[in-house]
């Protein structure tokens, strides 16, 4: 069943155009990215977004956003983004809690 979820602390990602979002079952968090060096982690119990900045990130998002280009590989424990066939692929491994 689909329903709205009120959250705080994530306006930059929530209000961005077509962000990439993926669920990380190992951390029980939704992790979102839409360009730049910052990813946002949503704690589903508290409904609070936490920004995490990593220097040297994959750069700007695709002009149409990152929706469906940001995925989580549970087997590898990494988030992966591929914004274009003409650009590099990037992987991000978050520290374990």
Image (spheres, rainbow, N blue to C red):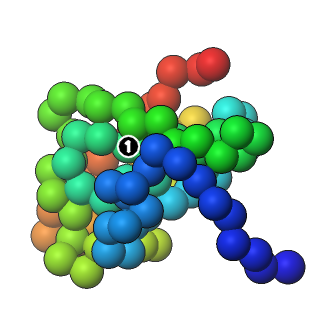
Neighbour class for label 1 at 10 Å: few (<14), some, many (≥20)? many
Q: Which image quarter holds the N terminus?
A: bottom right
Q: Residue at x 38, y 43 (%)?
A: 39
When the figure is inspected, residue 95 is found, relative to residue 13, above or below; the finding is above
Of residue 79 and residue 55, the one placed in the foreground of this image is: 55
Q: For this view, does 68 lie left or right of residue 12?
A: right
Q: Quadrant of residue 16?
A: bottom left
Dot 1: what SS? strand
Q: For this view, does 77 lie left or right of residue 58?
A: right
Residue of label 1: 39
| Residue 7, horizontal then vertical, whole percent | 59, 53
| Residue 69, horizontal then vertical, whole percent | 40, 67
Residue 48 seen in the current view: yes
Q: Residue at x 68, y 64 (%)?
A: 5
Q: Residue at x 51, y 21 (%)?
A: 95
| Residue 37, horizontal then vertical, whole percent | 23, 40
Number of dots carrying numbers: 1
Q: Which image quarter holds the C terminus?
A: top right
Q: Residue at x 70, y 39 (%)?
A: 46
Q: For this view, does 59 lie left or right of residue 4?
A: left
Q: For this view, does 67 lie left or right of residue 49?
A: left
| Residue 15, horizontal then vertical, whole percent | 37, 67
Residue 73 seen in the current view: no
């Amino acid at each position: 069943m689909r329903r709205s979820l009120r959250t705080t602390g994530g306006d930059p990602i929530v209000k961005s155009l077509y962000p990439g979002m993926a669920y990380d079952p190992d951390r029980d968090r939704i992790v979102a990215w839409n360009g730049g060096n910052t990813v946002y982690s949503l704690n589903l119990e508290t409904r609070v977004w936490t920004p995490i900045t990593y220097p040297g990130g994959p750069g700007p998002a695709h002009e149409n956003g990152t929706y469906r280009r940001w995925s989580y590989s549970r087997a590898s424990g990494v988030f992966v983004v591929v914004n274009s066939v003409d650009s590099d692929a990037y992987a991000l491994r978050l520290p374990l809690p």
